[in-house]
Amino acid sequence: TAPESTTPPAPSDRILILLKPDAVERRLTGEVLRRIEAKGYEVTALRMLTADPRTLAEHYSEHVSKPFYPSIVQYMTRGPVIAAVVEGERVVEGVRSLMGTTEPTTAAPGTIRGDLGRAWEGPAMENLVHGSDSPASAEREIAIWFPELAAAAS
Ligand code: GDP
Ligand code: MG
């Protein structure tokens, strides 16, 4: 193996997270970010905005044709969200693990959704937080929410 001094640092893994409107409404954005930061990940970009339906359709392109898609739009546009880029080694796996599974009712205790999610409070499946499900999804989603941080096309 090459001596350590000549080994370039591994490029940092990135994930796109969204603190959804229920997290903002319930004053849990700090708690969610606290858990992510406490694990050792670094927040490298942060922005609060109200999502527009076109941005959401791009972001949730895999869900646009599903029957529950209108409820996602209603949920995600009813108030501001906080979008963030978080970096760290294997951060996609790590943050997905911290988030817990999609449905708060059955998400494991100890996870963000398991501890804090209240799915029954709205018509949508309200679960406080979005996190990209793979490094490829992360890059696709970062380009949507933070175009200025999009990886150079190769
Ligand atoms: P995630 O990656 O864990 O966020 O889950 P998905 O990618 O499968 O779904 C995206 C988001 O759509 C979820 O976080 C929920 O807010 C919502 N959602 C997923 N499945 C359902 C469903 O069956 N009904 C409703 N109303 N919303 C859903
Ligand atoms: Mg997903």
Image (cartoon, helix red, strand yellow):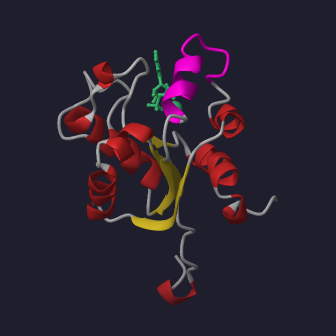
Nearer to us in this view, 81 or 13: 81
13 vs 132: above or below? below
Does residue 11 show up magenta in the picture? no
- What residue lies at 34% left-to-right and 52% top-to-bottom? 29
Magenta residues span: 63-76
On the image, the x and y values in percent for residue 124 come to 44, 21
- What residue lies at 37% left-to-right and 37% top-to-bottom? 22
Q: Say which quadrant the C terminus sits in.
A: bottom right
80 vs 28, left or right, is: right
- What residue lies at 71% left-to-right and 60% top-to-bottom? 150
36 vs 92, left or right, is: left
On the image, the x and y values in percent for residue 151 come to 71, 61
Q: Quadrant of residue 69?
A: top right
On the image, the x and y values in percent for residue 18 come to 48, 46
Residue lying farthest to the top in this orientation:
67
Does residue 71 show up magenta in the picture? yes
Nearer to us in this view, 69 or 17: 69
38 vs 43, left or right, is: left
